[in-house]
Image: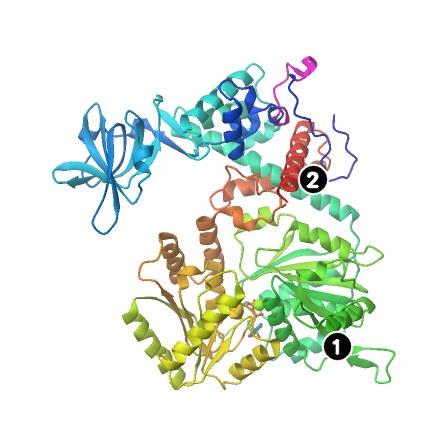
Amino acid sequence: MNARRRGQPIGGRAEGVVEADETDPQPAAAKDPLTLRELDAIGVERLNGVGPHRRKALRDVGVESVFDLITYYPRRYVDRTAQAPISEATIGAEITVVADVAAASSRRLRGGRQLVSVEVGDASGSMSVVFFNQAWRERQLAEGLTVALFGKVENYRGRKQMTNPVVDLLGDRTGKIVPVYPQSETAGIATWDVASWVAEARRRCSPRGIADPLPRWLRTRLGLTERSRAFADIHEPSSMAERTTARNRLVFDELLRVQLVLRSQRLAREAHELGIAHDPSGNLVDAFHRRLPYALTGAQQRTMAEIDADVSTVRPMHRLLQGDVGSGKTLVALHALLVAVQNNHQSALMAPTEVLAEQHFIAVRALLDGFEVPDGARLSGTRPLNLRLLSGSGSATHRREVLVEIATGTADIVVGTHALLQESVKFGSLSVVVVDEQHRFGVSQRARLRESGRDDRRLPHLLVMTATPIPRTAAMTVYGDLDVSVLDELPPGRTPVVTHWVRGPLAAEAMWSSVRTEIEAGRQAYVVCPLITESESLDARSAEQMHAELVAGSLAGLRVGLLHGRMPSADKESVMARFRAADLDALVATTVIEVGIDVPNATVMVVLSADRFGIAQLHQLRGRVGRGSHSSACYLVSDDDPTPTAVERLTALYESSDGFELAERDLELRGEGTLFDERQSGRSDLKLASLARDLHWVQAARDAATELIEADGDLDDHPALVDEIDWFSSRRDSDYLQRS
Ligand code: ADP
Ligand code: MG
């Protein structure tokens, strides 16, 4: 079937793709259970009731093959054994009612709100259901339709009523547990259509069954059900417990595929990649450490030692450095960068945006001010360390100059954006790369590194830093092939930041007066302006406006600076220098100050329209204060009436200052989509598994993958598993090609 060279990563290539054809699989194999690859080769149009029109509709929701269909999982289940008859529904209780629609009507209320009233009934009685501002409900809830309504029962003028309940259309389906599929009104797909197609697909598969590639011992050990059974029960469970058992099995499969690919890639990488071995101890690094005005934290020391061990071998480092805001990642990065320079190689520090690259450049320049590197060609034996910023904003001549220095090796440390990975940037001898990634540096960029290296194809050592901690599950999945270091200790002398949530004009007034009090006591404040659009120029304008307003109003008489991404670099630097020197009392800024700014005397952070920021960003902003010995405050100013998710975000910030905890909350609120790079293992493969909720299964899958790969890197004893992973990977690659 699938010829594989030994030592090649599984899931790494697109070979062995079975063309979707209209003939049945060969008779020789016809007795074997159907593999997922085979199910994916059967188009949904082969099912009864799926004509050209339905086929197109299904394609719009991503369902083209029978495999797609049986993994088009129910979004919810209505447990009819737990439903209450209307007559027995207690006022004030949250319940599910299954009833038929008798009539629906709508009218406009005074003040412009649209009211849809629906009469529903079951064998025991009737009630009314009202929806505000959901005009489409009148069309949706056609007479005669059976619906499940979940909500709180109220008493309205002596009758039972629900307001804005969760509605699931059930059609005329029976059964104790009714699966509710994601439906699409625009595509014209109803949940009962999906249910009937899935049922037909399963019926047609049943003579052969669906193959189970998991070794039996593993299934037994983990208490996992057989796969055909799982596919049956996820769609038509006879109890919610059965559905959970089914889900566990399918979740495990999804996660195991990802983990096997990661483990096997890692094995292959270790066998093939060659980097540069460094001597981590030497004058330059020593001098750097001697010059630090404080002692390293234990976590910093440990991490530096881990990096030293990595870079002193020819096996390229692939390490993820996680550390909360203020945990001191910059020093660790610098240590790694300097080890390269000390060994007569170059190093690079990359940030996701120009502004952040500039911030890093400024921070690093301050720390390396006056540093000399050995230079045999000079009489003195040394020359100044050459730190360069490669930015898109400088002049073309300057850029050319820097490129030449990079190519000849005279630039020791280069700071820039991911543009450093462009083909036009050739390093003389790049041996260490540090990436400050903020969720954005993915597998595809890491692959680019491979090409940006030296002519002798030696790979640079790679350290990926995350400014926001990543939940453990995600680290194991998205970055599963990396080693991980965690800075879990803050430098001493930090005072916790008190967080206030400011709602309404009165609270805002009180806040500004506290800000003035702090400033009068000699402290300084940041005021961060709302992020309005993706456009830097609009943000800049809003910051300018806010600056003018504050100078004329709440902060009148104080020295207030302005900082935004559109200012020329020199202006930005001079504003920052003045703020650092306490020549400014307050700094009105856009989120350019999110990372890299460190002014211990600044003790107040005001974030305007905080409801428009994400958790990670707010946590970063808050991390700009609380860096000195004075107590600090962070004010999150929101609308009077923020959206429910904004409320959850702000509450999370208000309740916790632990970056890891916040990262977990963020993952729960936003889902995993945001974590993955386009091509990264896992993204489209995780249909059921949730990185926020399935920690146990992520761990189990990782352990199983390690065990399988360690026993046999090529998985020769598990051809079905290998075939499935190869097929999955090729599917993902072709998805990717279609999308780009
Ligand atoms: P991060 O990038 O992890 O958010 P930084 O590297 O910006 O954190 O460090 C935050 C602050 O802590 C900086 O002012 C830095 O100089 C200071 N710092 C770093 N390490 C130590 C240490 N071991 N002891 C005292 N202060 C430290
Ligand atoms: Mg930092």
Q: Residue 385 carries which label?
A: 1
**Disc 2 C-beta below 8 A from ligand 1:** no
Instruction: In the displayed orientation, state which residue is furthest to the left.
Output: 158
Q: Does the magenta stretch include residue 29?
A: yes
Q: Counting other residues with Cα less than 10 Å from the Cα at mark 1, is it few (<14), some (14-19), or many (20 or more)?
A: many
- Closer to the observer: label 2 or label 1? 1
Residue 2, x across and y down, in percent:
74, 28
Q: Counting other residues with Cα less than 10 Å from the Cα at mark 2, is it few (<14), some (14-19), or many (20 or more)?
A: some
Q: What stretch is highlighted in magenta?
A: 25-38
Q: Is residue 417 magenta?
A: no
* Residue in view at x 59 percent, y 65 percent: 299
* Residue in view at x 47 percent, y 44 percent: 693
Is residue 377 rendered to the left or right of residue 419?
Answer: right
Question: Nearer the N terminus, badge 2 or badge 1?
Answer: 1
Q: Is residue 594 above or below residue 577?
A: above
Image quadrant in which you'd find residue 105: top left
Q: Mark 2 to mark 1: distance in Å?
A: 45 Å
Q: What element carries label 2?
A: helix
- Count how many numbered circles sit on residues in the image: 2
Is residue 107 rendered to the left or right of residue 662?
Answer: left
Q: What is the three-letter code of the residue carrying label 2? A: Glu
In-front residue for pair 391/715: 391
The residue beneath circle 2 is 710
* Residue in view at x 62 percent, y 66 percent: 354
